[in-house]
Image: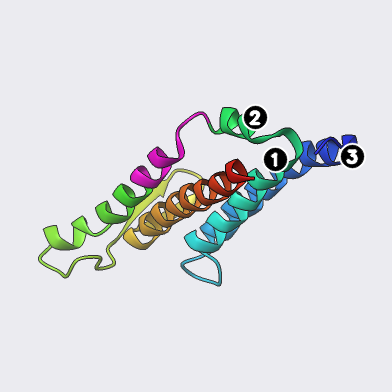
Amino acid sequence: MNSIILRTATRFMLPLLILFSIVVLLRGHNQPGGGFVGGLLATSAFALYAMAFGVPAMQRILRVPLTTYIAVGLGIALASGVPGLLEGKPFLYGMWTSFDLAGFGTLKVGTPFLFDIGVYITVLGVCLLMLLTLAEES
C-alpha cells in the first residue's frame, strides 16, 4: 500500500501501540490483560507497520528471526516453572520475591510475571510468523 497518510500515522501509532501492549502486559497478572493480549496488541502494531512500509521493512525493525522470538518466549515461560521445582513445589508454582528500591519503595516480582513475558514474546513471534506467511502467499 502506498499511502502517505497511512505511513505518517503508522510512525506515530507504532510506539504508542507497543507502549500500550507493554502496559497491558504489566497489569495482566492483577487485572485483565497479560502476555497473550499484550502480544496480540504488539502483533497488530507490527502488522500495521508491515502494511504501511512493507514486510521487509518490518523484518528489519524486528532485527531477529521470528522463530527466535518463539524459542526465547517458550524458554522464558518454561524457566518460570523451575523455581517452584527447586523449592519442592509443583511445576509453575507461583513464587514471589521482593526488592527494596531506595527511594521508590518495595518491588514485588514473581514467576507469574516471567510466565506472562514468555507468553507475550511467544504470541508475538507466532502471530507475526502466521501473518508473514499469509502475506508471502498473496
Magenta stretch prevailing secondary structure: helix
User: What amino acid is found at the position of numbered circle 2 in the picture?
Assistant: Ala
Q: Disc 1, disc 2: CB below 8 Å?
A: yes
Instruction: Using residue 93 as the reference point, say whether residue 69 is left or right of it.
Output: right
**Picture coordinates of residue 31, whole percent (x, y):** 54, 72
Measured in 3D between alpha carbons, the distance from the residue under mark 2 to the one under mark 3, in whole angstroms, is 17 Å
Measured in 3D between alpha carbons, the distance from the residue under mark 1 to the one under mark 3, in whole angstroms, is 13 Å
Give the mark, 2 or 3, whose residue is nearer the N terminus.
3
The numbered mark at residue 57 is 2
Residue at (59%, 30%) from the top-left corner?
Answer: 61
Residue designated by label 1: 49
Q: Is residue 31 above or below residue 65?
A: below
Measured in 3D between alpha carbons, the distance from the residue under mark 1 to the one under mark 2, in whole angstroms, is 8 Å
User: What amino acid is found at the position of numbered circle 3 in the picture?
Assistant: Ile
Is 67 inside the magenta-drawn segment? yes
User: What amino acid is found at the position of numbered circle 1 in the picture?
Assistant: Tyr
Q: Residues within 10 Å of mark 2 (few under 14, many from 20)?
A: few
**Range covered by the magenta-colored residues:** 63-72
